[in-house]
Every structure is written in structure tokens, then in C-alpha cells.
Image (spheres, grey):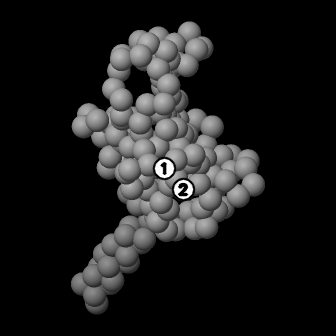
Amino acid sequence: MKKCLLSFFCAALLLLSSCAKKSCCVVPVTPDFIIADKNGVKWEIQPAASNILGDTTTIAGTQTQGGEEETFSIKLSIGGVGYYPLKNHQGYYLLKKNGAITKKYALSPTHLNSVSVISVNQADMIIQGFFDLKFIKTYDSQPGAGADSVSFLDGKFKVTLHN
């Protein structure tokens, strides 16, 4: 009887300890990001000003390095998860120095620029997806300086949208 009672007590302890709340299953929150291979080099920009205005969703980022400000922006109408080919006016990339635009790029009309939205969380206003973009230079304050085109390939993003 004692052996049976001891076995029952051990089994009850194992069962209770296995049901205890554990923090091992808590999934960490991934911060927002926009990353890609920019002209073949790993590139990352901090998401900023990503928003929804009317039916237009803007995925944008900005950063400053070496006194030069870099801005990246894509605008599209998202109807949910799906593939979205972009037209020339739906994206831009620009560089500024001391507040003045030094280079401006628009989406290349000869490249199949696209965004694939893989997740839309409407409750938290978070979207995630992939992009493949190529920009061509439309303005240069110092003609002949810098690349005539900039490619952002194998791009990925997760952004929180604001109204």
C-alpha cells in the first residue's frame, strides 16, 4: 500500500510540475525593419513614417550616415496578402546633404518592380513582406557623381503603420 501511495504521490508531483506556467514558449516581438541587398551589399534602413492615408499604404525608412541622409519609400494600395507590381510613381529613393536633395531616384520602367505582402495584422496595423526594386537616377546636384541606378534585391520588411 505504501509503494502504491508513494507512486501516486510521485506521479501527482510530476503532473503538477509539468503543468506549471513556463516562459519558454513566449515568442519575442521582432522590431520593425527594412533590409535588402543594395547593389549587392547588405543594407538596412530604419522604418519611419510608414502609414496609411486613405487607400495608400506607405512603407518608408530614413537614416543618416556620414552627414548624408538616405530616404527610401514605396507607396501602394494593399488589399491584403498578395503580389503588387509597382509603377514608376509608386516609389523613390533619395539622398540629402545639409537638408538639400543631392540625388533623386525613381523606379526603373524596365525592371519588374514588385512587393509581395505575406502578412497583414489589421489589429496591430503591422504588415510584412518582400520587395525587389531597381531605381534610376532622375536628379543629381553633381552630375556624373554616384551610380546611375540603385538596386534593392531580396528585400524584406516588417513595419507598423500609423494613421
Mark 1, residue position: 158
Left or right of residue 118: residue 15 = left
Q: Is residue 92 above or below residue 160?
A: above
Q: Amino acid at mark 2?
A: Ile
* Residue pictured at 24% horizontal, 84% vertical: 3
Residue 76: quadrant of the picture: bottom right
* Residue pictured at 33% horizontal, 83% vertical: 8
Q: Nearer the viewer, residue 138 or 120?
A: 138
Q: Is residue 99 above or below residue 87?
A: above
Earlier sequence position, callout 1 versus callout 2: 2
Expressed as whole percent of the image width and height from the top left, the position of residue 127 reads 54, 56
Residue 163 seen in this snapshot: yes
Q: Which mark is residue 127?
A: 2
Q: Secondary structure at mark 1?
A: strand
Q: Nearer the viewer, residue 28 or 51?
A: 51
Q: What's the distance in space between the residues labelled 1 and 2, CA to CA?
A: 6 Å
